Image: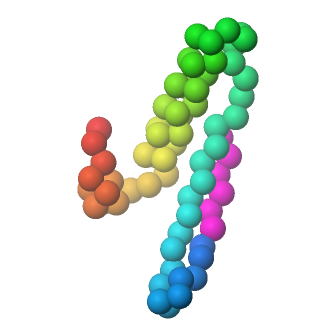
Amino acid sequence: MHTKLNTKYLENDGEAIRLQLTARGMPSGYNIKDIEDFFDFGREEIVNYFTKITTDSMHEIWGRKK
């Protein structure tokens, strides 16, 4: 898992934060099913990691469903 966090200053004197999560790896094979399984696994890992590194109070604000 690779994590990147950037800040950006907005024209209205505000600030935004961008969190980028990237899961890297290789499918177990080269057929469509293996590739789809790989992407499903990567997405699940990103969601789990995001949940782990953010707070429950922010999950409530965002309306996260468990």
Instruction: Say how the picture is coloured.
Output: rainbow
Image position of 23 with respect to 10: above or below: above
Quarter of the figure with residue 37: top right
Quarter of the figure with residue 28: top right
Tell me how many marks there are.
0
The residue at the point 47 percent across, 38 percent down is 48
Is residue 3 covered in magenta? yes
Q: Could you say where residue 38 lies in the image, as x and y percent from the top left?
A: 61, 22
- Please tell me whether the stretch drawn in magenta is mainly helix, strand or loop: strand
Q: Could you say where residue 30 lies in the image, as x and y percent from the top left?
A: 72, 11
Quadrant containing the N terminus is top right
Residue 4 relative to residue 17: left or right:
right
Image position of 64 with respect to 33: above or below: below
The residue at the point 67 percent across, 9 percent down is 31
Quadrant containing the C terminus is top left
State which region is magenta: 1-6
Q: Could you say where residue 9 lies in the image, as x and y percent from the top left?
A: 57, 82
Quarter of the figure with residue 39: top right
Q: Could you say where residue 35 lies in the image, as x and y percent from the top left?
A: 63, 18
Image position of 29 with respect to 5: above or below: above
- The residue furthest bottom is 13
Is residue 46 covered in magenta? no
The residue at the point 48 percent across, 47 percent down is 50
Residue 61 relative to residue 25: left or right:
left
